[in-house]
Image (cartoon, helix red, strand yellow):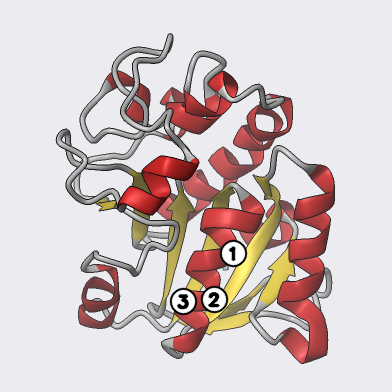
Amino acid sequence: HTAGAGPAATPSAFTWPAGAAALVMIDWQKDFCHPGGFGGSLGNDLSPLIAAIPAAARVLAAARAASMPVIHTLEAHLPDLSDCPASKKRRCPAIGQPVAAGGRALVRGEPCNALVDELAHLPGEKVIHKPGKGAFFGTDLDAHLRASGVSHLIFTGVTTEVCVQTTMREANDRGYECVLVEDATESYFPEFKAATLAMITAQNGIVGWTAKADDVVTAMRG
């Protein structure tokens, strides 16, 4: 059968063939969502991100109940930072430095680099450690999706204008149909989120669709 997010999707209803959709959970890690993490250490207001976790959890639960593939991503560098470009480190010297949430910021395997408890992965769910903003760069995500027969991607995550948008644009260029769950994504800067949603859906969905969590959950239930 075909499922769809319903009339609340923008710019039109988003549908997917049975068995062809996957949920992509972008960077719900303590680095960005914990007061003592990387994002907090830069002085950002984490409250919008924290407020989006319940909606993301509802979508995640619905995907699991529907036996939909789930992929989690983490922005994570190797301990020696050999996969962190010097240009990135110069612009963001906090990478690799100790943070109050535990361990070193944006370093794979550190306590601060773990997913938030509410959205932790389950055994069998794919976890992508990505060195860049986009989840396709330097990872096996594309090969994994194609091997699984996935053509449609449902996104939640943070931050909307950086890692989420970058990954959606990468996916769009690779031929995937994408929808972003509006209330299950957030930014430290509300105006950046609003601009990103507008850019994604402009010109008949130049990058993809957006929809509300409740509509996506209803569609997942079939």
Q: Amino acid at mark 2?
A: Arg
The spot of residue 82 in percent (x, y) is 17, 47
Query: In the figure, 10 relative to 183: above or below?
Result: below
User: In the displayed structure, would residue 110 be above or below residue 56?
Assistant: above
Q: Which mark is residue 169?
A: 2
Q: Specify whether residue 72 is in view.
A: no
Name the amino acid, label 3.
Glu
Q: Disc 1 and disc 2: Cα gap in Å?
A: 6 Å
Is there a contact, CB below 8 Å, between mark 3 and mark 2?
yes
Q: Residues within 10 Å of mark 1 (few under 14, many from 20)?
A: many
Q: Secondary structure at mark 1?
A: helix
Residue 131: x and y in percent read 30, 53
At horizontal 81% and vertical 62% (from top left) the residue drawn is 195
Closer to the chain start, of discs 3 and 1, is 1
* Left or right of residue 167: residue 137: left
Evaluate if marks 1 and 2 touch, with contact meaning CB atoms under 8 Å apart: yes
In the picture of the structure, the residue carrying the numbered disc 1 is 165
Q: Quadrant of residue 205?
A: bottom right
Q: Is residue 13 above or below residue 83?
A: below
Q: What is the three-letter code of the residue carrying label 1?
A: Gln
